[in-house]
Image (cartoon, rainbow, N blue to C red):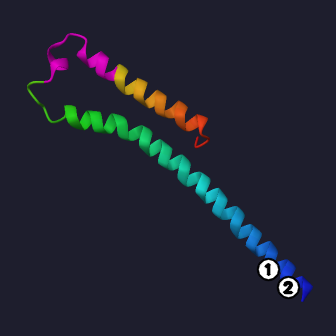
Amino acid sequence: MGSRETLASIVETAALLEAHRQGEMTRALAAWAAILAVPTAIAGIYGMNFDFMPELRWHYGYFAVLAVIAAICGALFLRFRRIGWL
């Protein structure tokens, strides 16, 4: 009876370790998806070809939008790194 309980305990521990590993992978994938969603959303808005976007008439508008995208993605990356998701 003792060896059966030990074996059941080992199997349960292995299952818990695998669930923990999958949870870590899921968090990392969710963090990367959130980071990649920012440029996708901004590019989607600019892809609608609105006529009245102030950045379109400004000479440095393209670079400003790229800087905003980079800043948001960088901030998300640092935040996810700090909380241990990446």
Left or right: residue 68 versus residue 7 is: left
Q: Residue at x 25, y 11 (%)?
A: 60
**Three-letter code for the amino acid on which mark 2 is drawn:** Arg
| Residue 52 in the image, given as x and y percentages of width and height | 9, 24
Tell me, yes or no, whether the highlighted magenta stretch contains residue 84: no
Q: Quadrant of residue 10?
A: bottom right
Label 1: element kind:
helix
Q: Residue at x 64, y 63 (%)?
A: 19
Q: Quadrant of residue 80?
A: top right
Residue linked to disc 2: 4
Helix, strand or loop for disc 2: helix
Residue located 43% across and 38% down the image: 35
Q: Give the residues drawn in magenta, as a range.
A: 53-66
Q: Position of residue 46 (x, y in %)?
A: 20, 31
Magenta-drawn stretch contains 56: yes
Taking the image as shown, residue 33 lies to the left or right of residue 62, namely right
Relative horizontal placement of residue 11, taking residue 24 as reference (left or right):
right
Tell me whether circle 1 and circle 2 mark residues in contact (CB < 8 Å): yes
Q: Is residue 5 left or right of residue 42?
A: right
Tell me the crowding category of disc 1: few under 14, some 14 to 19, or many 20 or more residues within 10 angstroms, Cα based.
few
Q: Residue at x 32, y 38 (%)?
A: 40
x%, y% of residue 1?
89, 89
On residue 8, which mark appears? 1
